Amino acid sequence: MDKKQVIVIGAGPGGLAATLLLASKGYRVTVFEKKDYIGGRNSPIKLGDYTFDMGPTFFLMKDVLEDIFHFAGRSLYDYVEIKELDPMYRLLFSGNRTLLLSRDKGKMKQTLESFYPGSYEGYLKYLAKEKKKYDKLIPCLQMPYGKVTDFFKKQLITSIPYLDAHTSIYNVLSRYFDNNDTRIAFTFQAKYIGMSPWEAPGTFSIISYIEHGGGIFHVMGGLNNLSQAMAKAAQEEDAVIHTGSPVKKIIIENRTAVGVELEDGTIEKADYVIINADFAHAMTHIVDPRNIRKWTASKLENSRYSCSTFMLYLGVNKIYDRIPHHNIIFSDDYRKYVEDMTDQTTVSEDLSFYVQNASVTDPSLAPEGKSTIYVLVPVPNNKSRIDWEGKKADFRNRLLDLLENKAGFQNIRKHIEREKVITPLEWENEIDVYNGATFNLAHNVAQMLYFRPHNQFEEFKNCYLVGGGTHPGSGLPTIYESGRITADLIFKKDGLQN
């Protein structure tokens, strides 16, 4: 095969996964990244001598990335050092009631029975039944859904009894646990896709099983090193990655993508174009609306989107060595908080939030004796029209109060040396996330599988999608899968074995 040219728009994790896979098969891959860094939301933030992950901090399903590197004739472990976390995380409920969750069954029996007697028996049932569901559903998420007939593939048909698409994650976990807080401990993971446990399809109950069945991992130096590793491996296969090179538009001829025009006017031609930019942002910024029939501006505006996040990154001159790596602090009325968030108009007074205290695991992130503290609060996306510029300072102070008085980070204000805030406005205006919806299009049934934008893009030929806005959806493992699905589609089109 003559070497075919592929252009990838954006150097996020999905684009880098596709780049590595295609380059390893001899394709000439060129990546154009608008920012001066790679990784998209999986990139580092440097504040002096402190290093933070901008976005994802949980590394799950590491076998997906292991397989991608293996396909390319490489080992992931030649590029990164990975450590499993135990406990996986601390969950802090009202009344200072705490769960430290682990994959160690002895530890789980002790912590669950102390928290709510009888819970451990439900936990064992949960592990057994959710494993069966996981084994059935994962192959379904690894397939493309470009045609309605894909719904009749054997893998999906045989998985129907396990889908639970007719109910919610919370209702699925109610089969195993009687206590509300214990149910929340296994359903809060809906936040990984920016949804409410009471609304997200029960299909996604496998997310918590992914943690309990496969573990949660930390990449030394930060999860952003996963993107750095893919970029390095791809460049070793002669892929070219240009940063600071924004694409102005995709060139479409006869309803076929034939290349891109860069902001500086340069024209680059290719056999295939892969879009790794935020999907809705790309449709409204780099695609001529005259070339769009389905995903019009009106359809995008009326689609459902995930929540956004308020981010606080703190470099502090102290180590909080008694606080675990991952922490989720729940509001007293978690359901009300979630409903306030998902109605897209209100920020609850009683906040729930996530804190990463990664320096207890990874001293490379901060100078000796110091720490990086990463705080994430799910909040409405920018359809809410919340005035974040006006609210930012007050919201930041509320968070610091909660860190000190509820989360156990005593006197943290006195120890702050470096600080950065990202609000939903910054997500949209500086990081090009449509509506500031950090988890992309919502994952309701009407926006999943065939009903999500297709990996082989339906608007025009020789154009493909990767990232959280296409199938299988948001979250690092599924974004990597989108890169693999797209690469496989191109291999199939060219008659190559994958």
Image (cartoon, rainbow, N blue to C red):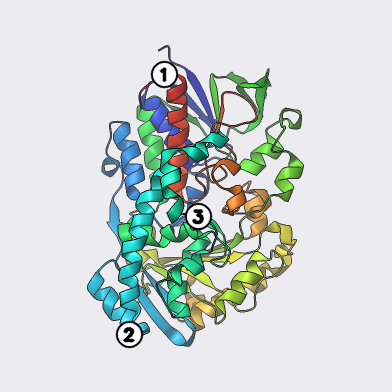
User: Which amino acid lies under the numbered mark 1 shown in the image of this protein?
Assistant: Gly
Is disc 1 placed on a helix, strand or loop?
loop
Q: Which residue is denoted by mark 1 in the rendering?
A: 495
Q: Nearer the viewer, residue 133 or 469?
A: 133
Mark 2 or mark 3: which comes first in sequence? 3
Q: Which residue is denoted by mark 3 in the rendering?
A: 55
Query: For the residue carrying disc 3, how many other residues have a C-alpha within 10 Å: few (<14), some (14-19), or many (20+)?
Result: many
Residue positioned most to the top: 2
Residue 84 numbered mark, or none = none
Residue 121 can be seen in this image: yes
User: Which amino acid lies under the numbered mark 3 shown in the image of this protein?
Assistant: Gly
Q: Position of residue 136 (x, y in %)?
A: 38, 49
Q: Nearer the viewer, residue 451 or 215?
A: 451
What is the spatial separation of the Cα atoms under label 2 and label 1, in whole angstroms? Answer: 58 Å
Mark 1 or mark 3: which comes first in sequence? 3
From the viewer's perspective, is 264 left or right of 127?
A: right
Query: For the residue carrying disc 2, how many other residues have a C-alpha within 10 Å: few (<14), some (14-19), or many (20+)?
Result: some
What is the spatial separation of the Cα atoms under label 2 and label 3, in whole angstroms? Answer: 33 Å
Q: Position of residue 326 (x, y in %)?
A: 40, 67
Q: Which residue is denoted by mark 2 in the rendering?
A: 114
Mark 2 or mark 1: which comes first in sequence? 2
Q: Quadrant of residue 89?
A: bottom left
